[in-house]
Image (cartoon, helix red, strand yellow):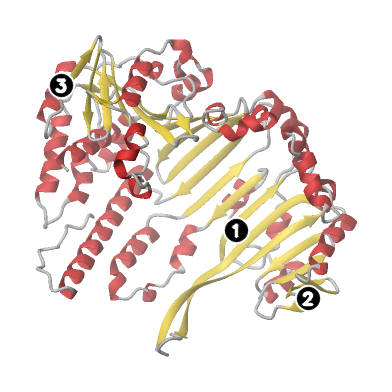
């Protein structure tokens, strides 16, 4: 257990350590070019934001405090104090990567790369860990195993390498554990043979084999941002990562060349994520041809409520779908399937214009009295409630009626003028509370008849802030949620004495989170841009706000776990130790 704690402290410290000293060189050369994901963290910036709010690693480790085992927190603090002088260089960004994915075998590697300032201090730190592992030297490379992690270093950098471990399934085999021994790599000093081979390979990479040679990645990490994220679909679409794609060469060709870059920045009052997705020439040709539509805000503006919980809208040219099917080489398969119902992909595409909107309002929790069918005892059940509208712009009415006739012939829908009634085997389903109708060029669905009537009459006006509306306008995909309204609609009365800690977490969340939004633009011939924001308390940086909330939630859940454990011990006549824990403020 102590050794496992050592490993966790090392990884956690890589994230939270602030550093001083001269700027170190980039270590991206130790990350393979085919890595699926790479996350670069500006530790210096993030820790600076935490320290301005009086948050330190010592503060964050307080979640480990537990009076049933006071030594846990003390050991963590001791480990941290030792680690602060372990010779690592945190002036540069720290890189977390998924260098290889093999869906065929289920193997996934996780790599952490940091700089090294003083090898002797690192070895001294390792020597102080519980059951200190032996350092193995192999040329310029040194390595040790701590728990299930392989830690290797040369004179420039440290790599922490871990791999996915297949579950122990020996109980499923007649021969037991011995029958699986041949499948388990033979142990070697410092780690398994496969991890050690990967470690050596990563340290031996040439620049043109590494992420350091990829302009999109180097441009990304050169920009200001607390967290930078790079995704490479070429790796995920590779034959080893996804063997199914070897049977679909056109799909593989369509996916090749897709990269995405994202920057997350913790600003005062909000977390901001900006992303760009770049595509290969094959997909770019298709997207460029069908780019252009933006969300139809007229579908949103007439929603009759001021108590808006969330809005989602998107618009696209329906012709994009059959073109993608064609380029992927599955258009004949799709048409063959639809032909059994007398349809084609062209029928479906013509039926819709490509504008969709969903608006949700008046969220709440309602107390419903129920009876246990087994003993007849009454109890209160809390159920979510709310009102919504789904609006879909109809394209060719003849094609749409052709689609609609399938549901009526199957007895799933009854036609009553312009209204559609959900049915079962041709009989109206009285238990279904959805109201569906065709209103000129709109298909409208709502769970409230009053909202439906007001929506189609266009008598209402949505209570959406100008900021939210302007954020959505001009995007091809847009999402907005008023987290404050949704959270405030959850009454504290629904929590009884056994759920006080959940109640406390809910109360804290109401004081932290305000709104959330996400938008995506059209393809501009080179890329697709997206942006997301989580709005929080305006006069404080969002990173310490988020960390303090997570610390508080962890402390509350820990106290609940201790109380549940104590109750179980009492119910089972066991001795009860002290279970009080220290809440985190």
Q: Earlier in the sequence, mark 3 or mark 2?
A: 3
Residue 231: percent from left, percent from top: 51, 31
Mark 3 Cα shell of 10 Å, populated few (<14), some (14-19), many (≥20): some
Residue 132 visible from this viewpoint: yes
Q: Which residue is drawn at 58% across and 66% down?
A: 361
> Could you tell me which quadrant the N terminus lies in?
top left
Tag 2 residue: 426
Q: Which of marks 2 and 1 is nearer the N terminus?
A: 2
Q: Earlier in the sequence, mark 3 or mark 1?
A: 3
- Classify mark 2: helix, strand or loop: loop
Give the CA distance from mark 3 to mark 1: 59 Å
Residue 330: percent from left, percent from top: 74, 38
Mark 2 Cα shell of 10 Å, populated few (<14), some (14-19), many (≥20): some
Q: Which residue is drawn at 26% across and 60% down?
A: 556
Residue at the extreme front of the image, as rendered: 175
Tell me if 222 is positioned left or right of 568 in this view: right
Q: Which residue is drawn at 65% across and 71% down?
A: 447
């Amino acid at each position: 257990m102590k050794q496992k704690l050592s490993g966790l402290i090392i990884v956690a410290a890589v994230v939270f350590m602030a550093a001083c000293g001269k700027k170190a060189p980039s270590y991206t050369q130790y990350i393979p070019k085919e890595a699926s994901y790479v996350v670069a963290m500006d530790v210096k910036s993030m820790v600076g934001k935490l320290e301005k709010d009086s948050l330190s690693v010592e503060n964050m480790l307080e979640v480990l405090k537990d009076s049933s085992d006071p030594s846990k927190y003390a050991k963590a603090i001791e480990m941290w104090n030792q680690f602060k002088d372990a010779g690592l260089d945190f002036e540069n960004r720290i890189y977390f990567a998924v260098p290889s994915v093999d869906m065929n075998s289920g193997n996934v590697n996780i790599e952490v790369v940091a700089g090294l300032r003083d090898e002797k201090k690192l070895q001294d730190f390792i020597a102080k860990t519980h059951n200190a592992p032996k350092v193995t030297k192999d040329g310029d490379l040194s390595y040790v195993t701590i728990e299930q992690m392989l830690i290797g270093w040369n004179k420039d950098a440290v790599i922490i390498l871990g791999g996915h471990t297949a579950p122990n399934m020996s109980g499923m085999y007649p021969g037991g554990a011995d029958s699986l021994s041949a499948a388990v790599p033979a142990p070697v000093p410092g780690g398994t043979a496969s991890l050690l081979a990967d470690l050596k390979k990563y340290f031996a990479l040439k620049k043109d084999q590494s992420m350091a040679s990829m302009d999109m990645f180097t441009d990304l990490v050169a920009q200001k941002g607390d967290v930078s994220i790079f995704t490479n679909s070429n790796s995920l679409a590779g034959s080893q990562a996804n063997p199914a794609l070897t049977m679909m060469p056109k799909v593989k060709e369509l996916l090749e060349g897709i990269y995405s870059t994202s920057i997350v920045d913790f600003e005062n009052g909000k977390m901001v994520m900006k992303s760009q997705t770049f595509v290969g020439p094959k997909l770019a040709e298709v997207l460029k041809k069908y780019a252009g539509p933006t969300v139809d805000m007229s579908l949103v503006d007439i929603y009759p409520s001021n108590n808006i919980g969330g809005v989602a809208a998107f618009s696209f040219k329906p012709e994009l779908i059959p073109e993608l099917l064609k380029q992927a080489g599955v258009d004949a398969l799709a048409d063959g399937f639809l032909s059994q119902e007398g349809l084609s992909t062209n029928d479906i595409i013509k039926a819709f214009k490509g504008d969709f909107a969903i608006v949700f309002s008046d969220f709440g929790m309602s107390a419903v009295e129920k009876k246990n069918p087994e003993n007849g005892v009454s109890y209160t059940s809390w159920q979510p409630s709310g009102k919504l509208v789904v609006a879909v712009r109809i394209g060719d009415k003849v094609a749409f009626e052709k689609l609609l006739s399938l549901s009526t012939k199957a007895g799933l829908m009854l036609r009553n003028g312009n209204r559609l009634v959900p049915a079962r085997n041709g009989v109206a389903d009285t238990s279904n509370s959805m109201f569906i109708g065709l209103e000129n060029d709109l298909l409208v669905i709502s769970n409230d008849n009053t909202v439906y009537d007001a929506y189609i009459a266009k008598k209402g006006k949505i209570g959406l802030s100008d900021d939210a509306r302007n954020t959505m306008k001009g995007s091809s995909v847009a999402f907005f949620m008023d987290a404050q309204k949704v959270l405030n609609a959850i009454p504290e009365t629904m929590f009884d004495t056994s759920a006080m800690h959940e109640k406390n977490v809910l109360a804290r969340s109401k004081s932290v989170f305000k709104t959330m939004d996400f938008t995506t633009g059209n393809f501009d011939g080179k890329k697709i841009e997206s942006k997301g924001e989580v709005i929080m308390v305006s006069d404080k940086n969002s990173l310490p706000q988020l960390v303090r909330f997570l610390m508080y939630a962890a402390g509350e859940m820990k106290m609940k776990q201790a109380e549940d454990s104590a109750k179980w011990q009492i119910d089972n006549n066991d001795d009860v130790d002290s279970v009080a824990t220290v809440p985190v403020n």
